């Protein structure tokens, strides 16, 4: 009996090896089939494989009548990510650099791409996406979800009654915000955060300003760069009379700049800095626009109901639950890190392309976001800014 045991163990080991080979081959085949059908919704969720091995061994000892059927079941439920099908969510393959055909792009409207990461801000997204969708200047609203740890069920639930398509990014890289996704079918792209809710009239006004000079970046929130002689380094600042950077709280740019940002080898090292710092993708896009256009950005004044800024750290009350999750809410060293980005971008690109603007669309370069203060919405800029580092 003991002489037969090694043979039995060897047989089971060979069967398990063969089964794993079959699983790997079938996994690759199914994955290729799914990725070819890019219109399907694929939300991926990894399962632990340790329990899979134990269950496969147990099933093998039972000698089932249909081993291949069990192989497929285990492959799908334990070895492969979980596929959750939805009519409004898209899981793209790894981004490929493709230049959009300008002849197929609309000029009368723009695509809104909202960057989402924090699940704490999900309750805001329904009202925010609805606000953008209500603007006659908007052709489509896309929620780009960049948090790889969010469960598929959470995003599946989010797609219900949401005025946007959900596009799950392959990773948490902030560079994905500027990828020329195939879903973008307009010349103008509005890149924005998930805590900004503008009045539809303000959105339309900003789009009209962009249309008057599509080479520029247009936005509501502006910052500036300056050179510190003492430290011999660039600093990130907010000045009252000039600006050189518009933030991705709300930024309208040409879709052509997305292709240049994401695909042009000249900016490869700068994109690596963005990934390393997990910050400053908006500053890099301003570098790209200024380098390509030789023009500074345009800041526009909000109209109608203004721009509700839920993420501003000066909010009171209900907004406090969502105001501390953004990158700009990390107050310590925030401006220093942004200045470091400017210095490093300058170094790797070999020049400083940022150009100052003295906008004619506003009276002064101040904050335009609305904050909750004692139960009332007031301009965030009417409060003490000295102790706050906002992006």
Image (spheres, rainbow, N blue to C red):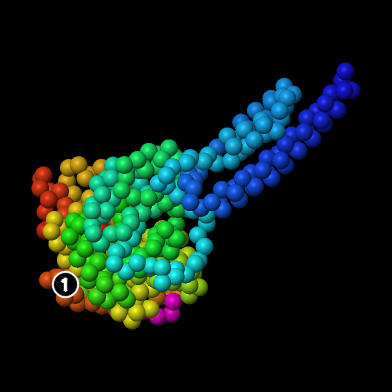
Question: Residue 162 is drawn in which quadrant?
Answer: top left
Q: Considering the numbered disc 1 on the image, is that residue within a helix, a strand or a loop? A: loop
Q: Nearer the viewer, residue 367 or 14?
A: 14
Vertical comparison of 229 with 389: above or below: below
Q: Quadrant of the N terminus?
A: top right
Is residue 358 shown in magenta?
no
Which residue occupies the extreme front position in the image?
104
Question: Residue 220 is drawn in which quadrant?
Answer: bottom left
Tell me the residue at 37%/43% (across/down): 159
Left or right: 89 in relation to 319: right
Vertical comparison of 65 with 301: above or below: above
Tell me the residue at 65%/28% (across/down): 55
Is residue 351 shown in magenta?
yes
Q: Residues within 10 Å of mark 1 (few under 14, many from 20)?
A: few
Tell me the residue at 43%/64% (across/down): 180
* Location of mark 1 (residue): 361
Percent x, y of residue 168: 44, 50
Percent x, y of residue 342: 36, 70
Percent x, y of residue 284: 38, 69
Magenta span: chief secondary structure: loop
Q: Quadrant of the C terminus?
A: bottom left
In this picture, which residue range is highlighted in magenta? 349-353
């Amino acid at each position: 009996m003991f002489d037969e045991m090694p043979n039995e163990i060897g047989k089971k080991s060979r069967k398990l090896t063969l089964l794993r080979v079959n699983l790997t081959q079938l996994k690759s085949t199914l994955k290729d089939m799914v990725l070819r059908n890019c219109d399907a919704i694929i939300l991926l969720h990894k399962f632990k494989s340790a329990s899979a091995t134990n269950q496969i061994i147990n099933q093998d000892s039972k000698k089932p009548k249909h081993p291949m059927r069990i192989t497929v079941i285990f492959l799908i439920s334990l070895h492969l990510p979980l596929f959750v099908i939805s009519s409004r969510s898209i899981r793209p393959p790894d981004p490929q650099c493709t230049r959009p055909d300008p002849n197929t792009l609309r000029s009368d409207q723009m695509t809104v791409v909202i960057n989402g990461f924090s699940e704490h801000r999900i309750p805001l997204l329904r009202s925010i996406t609805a606000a953008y969708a209500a603007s006659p200047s908007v052709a489509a609203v896309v929620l780009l979800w960049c948090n790889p740890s969010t469960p598929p069920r959470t995003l599946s639930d989010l797609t219900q009654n949401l005025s946007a398509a959900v596009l799950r990014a392959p990773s948490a890289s902030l560079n994905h915000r500027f990828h020329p996704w195939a879903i973008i079918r307009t010349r103008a792209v509005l890149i924005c955060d998930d805590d900004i809710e503008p009045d539809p009239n303000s959105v339309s006004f900003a789009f009209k300003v962009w249309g008057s000079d599509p080479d520029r970046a247009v936005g509501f929130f502006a910052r500036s760069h300056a050179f510190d002689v003492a430290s011999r380094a660039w600093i990130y600042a907010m000045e009252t009379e000039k600006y050189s950077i518009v933030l991705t709280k709300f930024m309208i740019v040409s879709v052509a700049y997305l292709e240049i940002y994401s695909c042009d080898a000249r900016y490869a090292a700068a994109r690596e800095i963005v990934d390393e710092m997990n910050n400053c993708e908006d500053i890099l896009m301003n570098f790209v626009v200024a380098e390509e256009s030789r023009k500074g950005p345009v800041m526009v004044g909000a109209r109608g109901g203004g721009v509700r800024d839920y993420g501003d750290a000066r909010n009171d009350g209900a907004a406090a639950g969502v105001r501390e999750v953004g990158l700009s809410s990390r107050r310590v060293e925030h401006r220093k890190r942004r200045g470091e980005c400017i210095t490093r971008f300058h170094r790797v690109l070999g020049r400083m392309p940022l150009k100052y603007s003295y906008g004619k669309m506003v009276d002064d370069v101040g904050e335009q976001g609305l904050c909750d203060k004692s139960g009332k919405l007031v301009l965030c800029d009417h409060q003490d800014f000295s102790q706050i580092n906002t992006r």
